[in-house]
Amino acid sequence: MYIIMVASECAPVAKVGGLADVVHSLSGELDQRGHTVEIILPKYDCMRYDHIYDLQIAYRDLWVPWYGGAIHCTVWFGFSDGRRCFFIEPHSQDNYFNRNDFYGFHDEVMRFAFFSKAALEFMLKTNKRPDIIHAHDWQTGLLPVLLYELYQYHGMQQQRVCYTIHNFKHQGVCDEEVLWASGLQRPEYYGNRDRLGDDFSPRHINLMKGGIVYANYANTVSPTHAWEARHTEQGYGLGHILHVHQHKFGGILNGLDYEAWNPETDTLLPHNYTVNNLDGKYANKIALCNRLLLEEAYKPIIAYIGRLDTQKGIALIRHSLFYALDNGAQFVLLGSSPEARINDEFWKLKFELNDNPDCHLEIGFNEELAHLIYAGSDMVVVPSLYEPCGLTQLIALRYGTVPIVRAIGGLADTVFDWNDEHKSPNPNCQRNGYVFYDATPEGLESALHRAIGLWNSHPDIFRRLLVHGMKCDYSWKQSVQNYLNAYEHISVTKV
Ligand code: ADP
């Protein structure tokens, strides 16, 4: 198959969050299976140019219709980690992608609506006719709309769109201006609530909604989150339209990059280990204690690694720290928040607990320390309020660290409670952690209590539990197959 990814991020050249990793890993895996994959990105001035090989002009004069005129663009080509990437560089006084940052500007919707249009215009003019265009998140929600309302009449009637939503919170809600700019016009037609009209802001356009309505297949990044988006407030108002289009909406679990995250070969670890020889894991625990000045005691280490964002359950993270300390465990936290208020709260906590030999808080982002914590800890806690997929629990499983998670989104699809008597639906990874339901201190404690209890009273069984986790397969293998099934389905049927 010939697949073109259109996205606002791709690791490592343009990475802000998980979207970048998905585009990077999925493209690589598809390529390895013999498919032709190209990626179209904006040419940001702040990209990691040191990760682009052989950057050269691919198409010098691309004129992209915009308002009544057109914007002159240059399209560049280069390899990033082996992936074939095209970068669109518009030349206009708007300077859409020369802002010294990826996101956060007043004309955000216009920037990415233009990018979506330019990507299609580039395919049209260079005779690229992929079987599948895979668009991601609100930034490219307008792409399937433009394809089916305009570009199919210029010779792109065979192309099919897969549209993946990584985060429902940001939907690209804007006024009608974007319709005039992109050449769609007819605000009364597109503004209809069956199409792009936002359900909550009258006379506003919702780009993500457009992506869902016009794509041939739409998905989010785990089956449980797909259900939550339709049936709960986690769809941020898109539940109704997802319901209307349920026949073409689903959830495909993200995978984990098993090459980057491999305790056997991880160069950031002082000691490597495998599921058959865990000595290195225990040596890493000692290394972690030394590194963070924790007392070397016969106690389990519980860790939290992640953004300190309300989404992640700040109060429960805090509660797990104190519960661990009160119940004979040690606690390590690595995280930071863009919100000063939350950062201050954790800095204060860090000072309060400064002399406690059983805990360490590291406020900031530290990739290398994250690897050591995953390897050296006994358990990782993930008490999120919502979690479309989540990587933390997947990394923990891979490193033999028992995840303690709230049963929502991708967490519910990947972690199964050790005490659950019912067989898990996934034969690969039955009972690999601890799960709780209520986002309350009592809910969290119900899982922490059992995990700490097993570690203390049955170390042999605890070891069996962590081995179960290490034997799970959450690589991209299955996820890529699921995407391929979706691609194949939509390329033979006109949904
Ligand atoms: P989200 O994408 O919502 O932040 P995920 O669980 O999907 O959450 O992914 C988070 C990733 O970022 C994990 O790989 C985690 O290890 C990493 N990470 C988060 N915070 C930090 C930090 N402070 N230092 C190092 N790695 C971090």
Image (cartoon, rainbow, N blue to C red):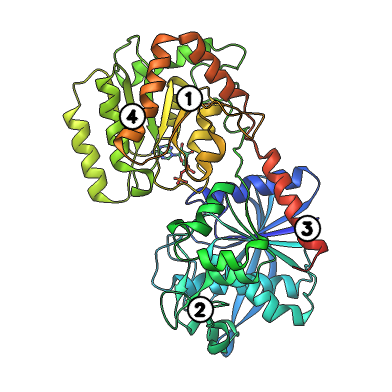
Answer above or below: position of 258 versus 97. Answer: above
Question: Residue at position x 38%, y 44% from top?
Answer: 312
Q: Which residue is outermost to the front? A: 421
Q: CA distance from mark 3 to mark 4?
A: 44 Å
Q: Of the residues shown, which amino acid type is indicated by label 1?
A: Val
Q: Residue 466 placed where, x, y %?
A: 53, 20
Name the secondary structure under disc 3.
helix
Residue 422 screen position, x and y as percent: 58, 29
Label placed on residue 197: 2
Q: Which of the two marks, 4 or 1, is nearer to us in this view?
A: 4
Sequence-first disc among 3 and 4: 4
Amino acid type at mark 4: Glu
Q: Quadrant of residue 68?
A: bottom right
Compared with residue 380, is residue 80 higher up or lower down, i.e. above or below?
A: below
Q: Secondary structure at mark 4?
A: helix
Q: Which residue is mark 4?
A: 445
**Residue 297 lies in what quarter of the image?**
top left
Q: CA distance from mark 1 to mark 3?
A: 37 Å
Question: Which of labels 4 and 2 is toward the front?
Answer: 4
Residue 385 left/right relative to 91: left
Residue beneath disc 1: 402
Q: CA distance from mark 4 to mark 2?
A: 44 Å
**Which amino acid type corresponds to the residue marked 2 in the rendered image?**
Gly
Compare residues 461 and 425 and report the one nearer the observer: 425
Pointers 1 and 3 in contact (C-beta within 8 Å): no
Q: Mark 3 vs mark 4: give the one in front.
A: 4
In the drawing, what numbered circle is on residue 489? 3
